[in-house]
Amino acid sequence: MPFLIAVLGLLGAAAFWWYRMKAMNDAAREVADVVGRVQGNIRRKKLRKQAALSPLTAIDDPVVAAATLITAIVSENGPVLPEREAIIRSVISEIADTKKKMDEAVVYAKWAASQIDDTTIVIDKLAPFLRERLDVTERNDLLQMVNRVAQTGEQRLQISDQRMLRLRQKLGFEVN
């Protein structure tokens, strides 16, 4: 009889510890699932942010970058109408080698500007790219091009001083 009680005690202890290990295993699995979901959310957020910036990260030509920057700043107040697009084309034709390159730059600029809602992001991404590739005179010309596109046409656009200040700063000019 004492042997039977000892065996039942051992079986009971083994069942108790087996149940405890199973519960700990389930808890560990739940923690791993939560950690995996959090990591997945972080990864998806990063991918969404990269996808939002992808039209800008694909730019490797200063002419396209300038066209995109000008178009984004001008389109902040509304869509780019045909008259304003003609002005952008004429300004970009001054710096583009060929008419084909000018057309490609303007078409890409309109598409990229329509993909990104925040002009600040465009300025933050493209101005340093242009600062590296343009000399001081060319950067001044770029600022004049932005002003010319905004001021020409039947409806003059008011570019906020904050945008122009940020653009000047990102292009490497001293800002007072």
Image (cartoon, rainbow, N blue to C red):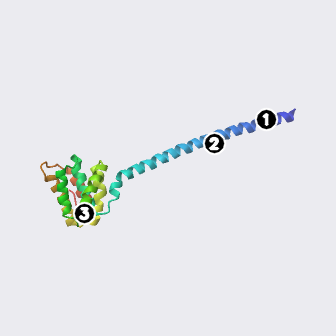
Q: Is residue 107 visible?
A: yes
Instruction: Name the secondary structure under disc 3.
Output: helix
Tag 2: Cα neighbours inside 10 Å, few (<14), some, or many (≥20)?
A: few
Residue placed under numbered mark 3 in the picture: 100
Residue 101, image x, y percentages: 25, 63
Which residue type carries mark 1? Gly
Question: Marks 3 and 1, how far apart in space?
Answer: 88 Å
Q: Which of 111 and 125 is in front in this view?
A: 111
Residue at (67%, 38%) from the top-left corner? 20
Q: In which quarter of the image is residue 87?
A: bottom left
Residue 105 percent location from the top left of the image = 26, 59
Q: Can residue 162 be seen in this view?
A: no
Assign a secondary structure to mark 2: helix
* SS for callout 1: helix
Check residue 25 in the rendering and tell me which mark sits there, or answer none.
2
Mark closest to the chain's N terminus, 2 or 3: 2
- Closer to the chain start, of discs 2 and 1, is 1
Residue at image point 57% right, 41% down: 30
Residue at numbered disc 1: 9
Q: In this view, does 77 lie to the left or right of 41?
A: left
Which residue occupies the extreme left position in the image?
154
Tell me the crowding category of disc 3: few under 14, some 14 to 19, or many 20 or more residues within 10 angstroms, Cα based: few
Nearer the observer: mark 3 or 1; the answer is: 3
> Reading the chain from its start, which is encountered first: label 3 or label 1?
1
Q: Image quadrant for the N terminus?
A: top right
Nearer to us of marks 2 and 3 is 3
Real-space CA distance between mark 2 and mark 3, rounded to the nearest whole angstrom: 65 Å
Q: What amino acid is labelled 2 in the image?
A: Asn
Pick the quarter of the image with the C terminus. bottom left
2 or 100, nearer to the observer: 100
The residue under label 3 is which amino acid type?
A: Lys
